[in-house]
Amino acid sequence: MKVEMKKGEVIIRSMQEKDRAEVLKMMQIFYASDVVIHKADDETLQKDISDCVGDCPYVDGYVFEIEGEIAGYGIAATGYSTEFGGVCIWLEDLYMKPEYRGHGIGRKFFEAVEEIYTDAVRFRLEVEKENAGAVALYQRLGYNFCAYDEMSKEI
């Protein structure tokens, strides 16, 4: 899905191959930080970008631009919720370069994904409770902690 939306001074657009190097740098910072539990190696991150810019039907990558500069990126993955009876969008990554934080770009990304994925019945994301700024933003936008504990198995 190719997207370009102007949200105030922020352009939210589909990730493109030309963005690879800059998105990879941001992903490396994000996945080396304390806000993620599982660290991702460069091979995994490169594959993530390839899937975002390629034809993978399950994932869409976005970049946020201000005055032609990339300020951050986000990734959304499509799934299905039998509990809610429809498409569930997982907001996989949301990263803003430090100099662009606190300017409402994250909020604008959430507004955009709700406009893009109009068939979604639920939006989900993961957050470390210690990431107080992200938790506060997500709660202001109507997100609540789930009562479920998540389990996973790596293959």
Image (cartoon, rainbow, N blue to C red):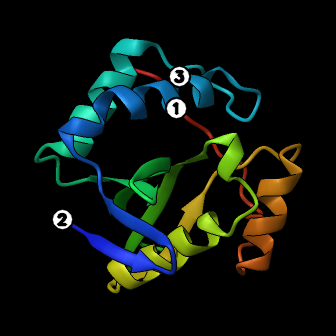
Residue closest to the far front: 67
Residue closest to the far left: 55
- Quick check: 140 left or right of 44? right
- Quick check: 115 left or right of 125? left
Q: Report, in whole angstroms, how far the alpha carbon at label 3 lies from the one at label 1.
A: 5 Å
Mark 1 secondary-structure assignment: helix
Which x, y percent locates residue 137? 77, 67
Q: Residue at x 50, y 57 (%)?
A: 91
From the image, which quarter does the N terminus lie in? bottom left
Three-letter residue code for mark 3: Gln
Q: Report, in whole angstroms, how far the alpha carbon at label 2 lies from the one at label 1.
A: 21 Å
The residue indicated by pointer 3 is 28
Is label 3 in contact with label 1 (beta carbons under 8 Å)?
A: yes
The residue indicated by pointer 1 is 26
**Which is nearer the eye, 86 or 93?**
93
Which x, y percent locates residue 53? 20, 44
Q: In which quarter of the image is residue 52?
A: top left
Q: Residue at x 63, y 72 (%)?
A: 107
Mark 3 secondary-structure assignment: helix
Three-letter residue code for mark 2: Lys
Q: Earlier in the sequence, mark 2 or mark 1?
A: 2
Q: Which residue is drawn at 72% across and 49% down?
A: 127
Q: Report, in whole angstroms, how far the alpha carbon at label 3 lies from the one at label 2.
A: 25 Å
Q: In which quarter of the image is residue 50?
A: top left
Q: Is residue 31 visible?
A: yes
The residue indicated by pointer 2 is 2
**Which is nearer the eye, 144 or 16?**
16
Q: Residue 91 carries which label?
A: none
Q: Determine crowd level at label 3: few under 14, some 14-19, many 20+ residues with C-alpha closer than 10 A.
A: some
Is label 2 in contact with label 1 (beta carbons under 8 Å)?
A: no
Q: Determine crowd level at label 1: few under 14, some 14-19, many 20+ residues with C-alpha closer than 10 A.
A: some
**Which is nearer the eye, 12 or 91?**
12
